[in-house]
Image: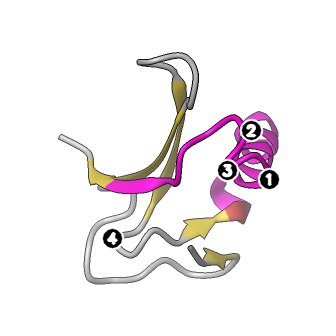
C-alpha cells in the first residue's frame, strides 16, 4: 500500500476507486477512502476528518481492520 501526496495517476479518473478497510469485528462496517487503481491515496485531497480516519485505519490493520482492498466505484 503506497501513499501519494502529489498528482493522481492519469490512467483512471480520480475518484474511480476506493481503498476499503473492512472492520475485523463488525461485518458491514469499515472505512472507504478515494484512491487510484493501484491503491495510492492522495492525502492532500482528503478532508481532515477522512485523513485522520484513513491514517487510523492503516495503523490498526490486523487488529481492528482487515487488510485493505482496492475496489472500483460504481
How far across and down, in percent of the image, does residue 15 sit?
A: 38, 54
3D distance between C-alphas at marks 4 and 1: 22 Å
Of the pair 57 and 34, the residue shown nearer to us: 57
Residue at image mark 3: 61
**In the image, what residue occupies the spot 70% across and 62% down?**
43
Q: Mark 4, mark 1: which one is toward the viewer?
A: 1
Report which residue position mark 1 lands on. Answer: 59
Left or right of 15? Residue 24 is right
> For the residue labelled by badge 2, is the local secondary structure a helix, a strand or a loop?
helix
Of marks 2 and 4, which one's residue comes earlier in the chain?
Answer: 4
In this picture, residue 57 sits left or right of residue 25 = right
Within 10 angstroms of label 1, few (less than 14), some, or many (20 or more) residues?
Answer: few
Question: Which residue lies under the disc numbered 4?
Answer: 37
Cα–Cα gap, marks 2 and 4:
20 Å
What residue is at 61 percent from the left and 39 percent from the top? Answer: 65
Q: CA distance from mark 3 to mark 1?
A: 6 Å
Amino acid at each position: 500500500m503506497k501513499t501519494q501526496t502529489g498528482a493522481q495517476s492519469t490512467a483512471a479518473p480520480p475518484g474511480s476507486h476506493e481503498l476499503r478497510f473492512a472492520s475485523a469485528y463488525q461485518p458491514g462496517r469499515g472505512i472507504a477512502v478515494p484512491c487510484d487503481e493501484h491503491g495510492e491515496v492522495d492525502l492532500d485531497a482528503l478532508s481532515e476528518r477522512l485523513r485522520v480516519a484513513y491514517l487510523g485505519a492503516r495503523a490498526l490493520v490486523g487488529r481492528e481492520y482487515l487488510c485493505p482492498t482496492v475496489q472500483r466505484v460504481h
